Amino acid sequence: MNMLRPSISEIIKENESPYSLVVAVAKRAREITDEAEEDKKVLIDKPVKLAIEEFAVGKVKMVESENIGLHVEE
């Protein structure tokens, strides 16, 4: 796995949605930002990069609902 820039296929498992990964990375990046602000830490790397790395090494995992995408409201 290339940690400099892991591909989506290296991170998601079979039957997981790449769109769900994008949402999960965004949520984790927000958590990283909030934690850094709370602890008054300066981040050297961008929160999105840190979040992607956490998913790539398995530090955090994505949990998808079984029924994701089955009901869409207009």
Image: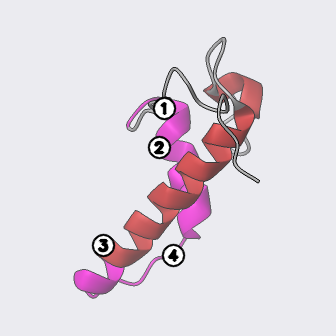
Q: Which mark is residue 54?
A: 2
Question: How far apart are the two marked residues, 4 and 3, measured between alpha carbons?
Answer: 14 Å
Q: Do the residues labelled 1 and 2 touch (CB within 8 Å)?
A: yes
Q: In which quarter of the image is residue 74?
A: bottom right
Q: Do the residues labelled 4 and 3 touch (CB within 8 Å)?
A: no
Per the image, label 1 sits on a secondary structure element best described as helix
- Return the residue at label 1: 57
- Return the residue at label 3: 35
Q: Do the residues labelled 4 and 2 touch (CB within 8 Å)?
A: no
Looking at numbered disc 3 in the image, what kind of residue is underneath it? Glu
- Tell me what residue is drawn at x 39 percent, y 65 percent: 31
Looking at numbered disc 1 in the image, what kind of residue is underneath it? Val
Q: 23 and 2: which one is in front?
A: 23
- Is residue 6 visible to us here? no
Q: Residue 44 carries which label?
A: 4
Task: Give the residues drawn in magenta, as a range.
Answer: 36-59
| Sequence-earlier tag: 2 or 3 | 3
